[in-house]
Image (cartoon, rainbow, N blue to C red):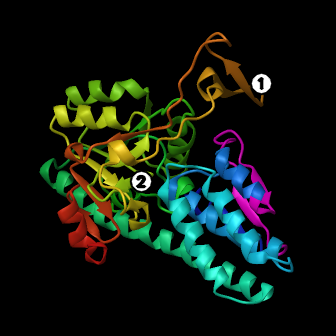
Amino acid sequence: MHKNRQPMRPIWVDPIDGMIRVIDQRRLPHKLEILKICTPDEMVQAIRHLVVRGAPLIGASGAYGMVLAAKTTAGLAEPDTALTEAARHLISARPTAVNLAWAVDRMLSRILSADSGNDRISLALKEADAILDAEVDNCRKIGNNGFALIQQIHSAKPGQPIQILTHCNAGWLACIEYGTATAPIYAAFDAGIDIHVWVDETRPLNQGARLTSWELGQYGVPHTLITDNAGGHLMQHGMVDMVIVGADRVARSGDAANKIGTYLKALAAWDNHLPFYVAIPSTTFDWTIQNGVQEIPIETRDPDEVRYVDGLYDGRIVQVLVPQACCPVANHAFDVTPARLITGLITERGVCAANEADILRLFPERA
């Protein structure tokens, strides 16, 4: 999206050395640091350790990881075997977001279609750029389609701000530009609609507090940071008009996996008769899965992500231990919101109900 209204993306190819540059999202909002990624293994580590995160960006990062793989395997005795192993390693970095496997598999197939090493490198870079640009265009269209939903609410309550709640970070840091959940928010803000966003802190890694609030603040969108458990209270007291979240994988039935805590927001929205939308590009659908609750793999992460919190102290980013160091911890990174709790899916092709029939209306080629 934009930093201080200047064009910026979280990943790009350096025109001088051809290496991949990424924003280190672990350091935000206190420091804007750029890392250089030179090898496929370095990209695996960047994905695994949340230097880059968010389903569309993870997919794009995997694609550029395969560009690096094409470079490092050129000239090997068995490059195809090495490329296939690099692809497998990249896909293993994060299990829940389907965009990663989709992008890496697409890249592997495209690279293997070329013969020589130089041809493969050129073809890989072109394909990765195409994946990146397509995700940007998807998010732009998601913004336009979601804007129409915000307009409807605005028309029903003229002169009052539209109150939107979001969970985690599905903004330009996660999605290259515009974001998914934030794209309609930016579109409404640019159109002059009075809008306010409730930003969940999103424990344990505080992506809402660290990233979404930073993005919205950079763009000038009015917002307020809240604790993860405050959303239901706000909904009960008429302080929320709609909920928009992103997702890391959506089943063909409409079940949606997103950051842990999303399911609870959907339950609260359902109980308070509020619309709950999931904004996703088509690359986030897993067309092979019918029952998201039973079939979507849920990543469990390092318990220390729960035990410790990062913050700025005396000009330095430091870690602080919250419970006893020996405290047992379960760190489930995602949950699945059943389709019955989702008002609609906002995609680049339009808005549909969260059920297979209406999803296939927008994507008939998947029938």
Q: Residue at x 33, y 42 (%)?
A: 293
Q: Quadrant of the N terminus?
A: bottom right
Chief SS of the magenta region: loop
On screen, 112 above or below 57?
A: below
- Disc 1 marks a residue whose amino acid type is Asp
SS state under label 1: loop
Q: Position of residue 320 (x, y in %)?
A: 69, 20
Mark 2 is surrounded, within 10 Å at the Cα level, by few (under 14), some (14 to 19) or many (20 or more) other residues, namely many
**Observer-nearest residue: 235 or 89?**
89
Q: Amino acid at mark 2?
A: Arg
Q: Position of residue 274 (x, y in %)?
A: 19, 40
Q: Judge whether residue 359 is colored magenta.
A: no
- Range of magenta residues: 16-40
* CB contact under 8 Å: marks 1 and 2: no
| Image side of residue 208 versus residue 318, left or right | left
Is residue 1 or residue 201 the one in the foreground?
201
Quick check: 133 above or below 7?
below
Asked if residue 23 lies left or right of residue 38, the reply is: left
Task: Verify whether residue 17 appears in magenta.
Answer: yes
Q: List the single residue furthest toward the top.
A: 324
Query: Which mark, residue 314?
Result: 1
- In the rendered image, is residue 317 in sight? yes
- At a point 70% along the width and 58% down the height, the residue shown is 22
State the residue at coordinates (51%, 55%): 55
Q: Quadrant of the C terminus?
A: bottom left
Q: Nearer the viewer, residue 319 or 210?
A: 319
Horizontal side of 334 relative to 18 (left or right) equals left
Measured as percent of width and height from the top left, residue 11 is found at 66, 63
Q: Is residue 5 something that shows in the picture? A: no
Mark 1 surroundings within 10 Å by alpha-carbon count, few (fewer than 14), some (14 through 19), many (20 or more): few
Rendered image: mark on residue 249: 2
